[in-house]
Amino acid sequence: MTQPALVTIASETLTAAINPLGAELWSITDRAGQQWMTDADPAFWTGHAPVLFPIVGSLAGDTLHHDGKAYTLPRHGFARRSDFALVAHDGATAHFRLRDSAETRAVYPFAFVLDMAFAVEGATLAVTATVSNPGNETLPFSFGFHPAFAWPLPGSTDKHAHRLVFTKDEPEPIARVNKQSGLVLERRYATPVRGRMLPLREQLFTNDAVIWTDLASRALTYGVEGGPALDVAFPDMAMLGLWQVPGAHYICIEPWAGHADPEGFTGDITQKPGIVLLAPGESRSFRMDVTVRGG
């Protein structure tokens, strides 16, 4: 397979590369050339940081219901497999756009514009997604980031030394999904977070993703105490997924606005738990900042 032409932006500290297919962040490297993202080993998962839109996770039966009609919409939606237009690009920024089309309306009957803006400054990469509603009816959607960061990070070889440290205590129970259907289970589980800290172990992901549907924190640090780390901030998003395929050399830290259908939900997309409703003419932005801190 031929590697697509990536769009590169850089500061004096970081270089980021984005694939216009899906407006997907593929790479974050530092001045030493160290890679802070996934190795995309096909034995586990070839994704890098797919954009989740207009849904996060799965719909029951991959079916979207609206105004009495049914539409087939696969897991995580279509943005990750869509060609985005490159609107602007300079040394440190890049801006991509996806608009609705006859193809998207066949599976998601709404007008929309999705802008993905990337900017590098110093040791921080800022990614801002903006959803706009150019139509004349309410736009129901979910949006999620899905970046896969290296595990272990550059400068460390011990996966078990890595942890998440949240900015606030996270005592609330977590959600899980049915591995077969991808739907959110009704049952909730005791949090694996100890105060603000979550030690990272592959066993966490034996039953798929760990999900917080009402997170107190809007930022966290992933990495090794006193060593390499990433600060991840997501000020506009109250949900978080954590996922990997056990054995892989990545961990996905996924800020979300929305989640998969709960088991038993069969209603209209506008009634879906966690859905975002955007009035005609309005826009809503979601930002994620990733700051590299070397060991």
Image: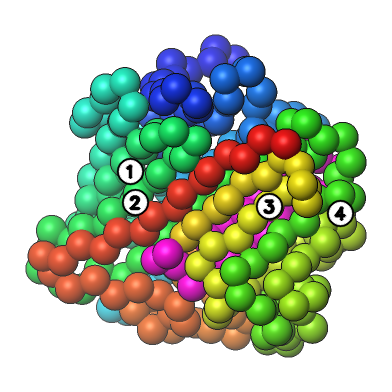
The picture places residue 266, in percent across and down from the top left corner, at: 50, 82
Label 3 neighbourhood size at 10 Å, few (<14), some (14-19), many (20+)?
many
State how far apart marks 1 and 4 are (Cα): 31 Å
* Magenta extent: 235-255
Between 120 and 268, the residue placed more toward the observer is 120
The picture places residue 38, in percent across and down from the top left corner, at: 67, 34
Q: Which color scheme did the rendering employ for the protein? A: rainbow
Between 101 and 129, the residue placed more toward the observer is 129
Name the front one of labels 1 and 3.
3
Label 2 neighbourhood size at 10 Å, few (<14), some (14-19), many (20+)?
many
Q: Are marks 2 and 1 in contact (CB under 8 Å)?
A: yes
The picture places residue 83, in percent across and down from the top left corner, at: 35, 33
Amino acid type shown at disc 1? Met
Instruction: Name the residue at 78% across, 31% down.
Output: 155
Would you say 46 lies left or right of 194 here? left
Q: Which residue lies under the disc numbered 2?
A: 129
> Is-magenta flag for residue 76?
no
Label annotation for residue 222: 3
Name the front one of labels 3 and 4.
3
Q: Secondary structure beneath disc 2?
A: strand
Label 1 neighbourhood size at 10 Å, few (<14), some (14-19), many (20+)?
many
Quadrant position of residue 2: top right
Label annotation for residue 116: 1
State how far apart marks 2 and 1 are (Cα): 5 Å
Sequence-wise first label, 1 or 4: 1
Quadrant position of residue 33: top right
Amino acid type shown at disc 4? Glu
Q: Secondary structure beneath disc 3?
A: strand
